[in-house]
Image (cartoon, rainbow, N blue to C red):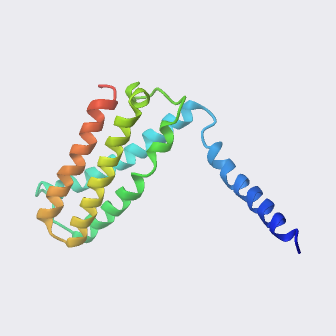
Amino acid sequence: MKQFPLLAAAACTIAVSLWSAPAQAQFAKPADAIKYRQAALTLMASHFGRMQPVIKGQAPYDAEQIKANVKLLNTLAELPWAGFGPGTEGGEARPEVWSDAAGFQQKRDALKDNLAKLQVAADSGDLDKVRAAFGGVGSSCKSCHDSYREKK
């Protein structure tokens, strides 16, 4: 019985290392990380853009559709950052992503905060609140693009 805690700890260590191995091997090449983050950001832009006609008053307001898009945006917003690891420079990302990691993190945090505000607004069902919060998210995106994305 004295060996049980030691065996249990060893089993847990092995299980964790096997579980985390796929995450470490997720990007075999820097190009894979670049494609991953670009795909995640493209999906975010798509779901954000789907709400724009409603925000502008060009399409009817469907509170449930807005909530669904915002919920999905919150999930998608967790994805791209894994693709910005060391050695993954390139794509449309400027070198400042890596040389100004603290500033880049601040932009990510601002996006997360503004998405949380958009979620609260969407949950309220109040279109005016959604419009205001939508603008905050858009500003977060623009701010990061202005600082950390190559100009097209």
Residue sitting at x 77%, y 56%: 14
Quadrant for the C terminus, please: top left
| Residue 22, percent from left and from top | 66, 49
Residue sitting at x 55%, y 28%: 87
Q: Is residue 92 above or below residue 74?
A: above
- Would you identify the image quadrant in which residue 129 lies? bottom left
Observer-nearest residue: 37 or 110? 110
- Would you identify the image quadrant in which residue 131 lies? bottom left
Quadrant for the N terminus, please: bottom right
Q: Is residue 41 above or below residue 114?
A: above
Which residue ends up furthest to the front in the rendered image?
2
Q: Is residue 4 left or right of residue 54?
A: right
| Residue 58, percent from left and from top | 12, 56
Observer-nearest residue: 32 or 141? 141
Residue sitting at x 22%, y 46%: 138
| Residue 112, percent from left and from top | 33, 52
| Residue 75, percent from left and from top | 41, 58
Q: Is residue 146 left or right of residue 25?
A: left
Observer-nearest residue: 107 or 26? 107
Observer-nearest residue: 117 or 80? 117
Tally of numbered discs: 0
Residue sitting at x 30%, y 37%: 144
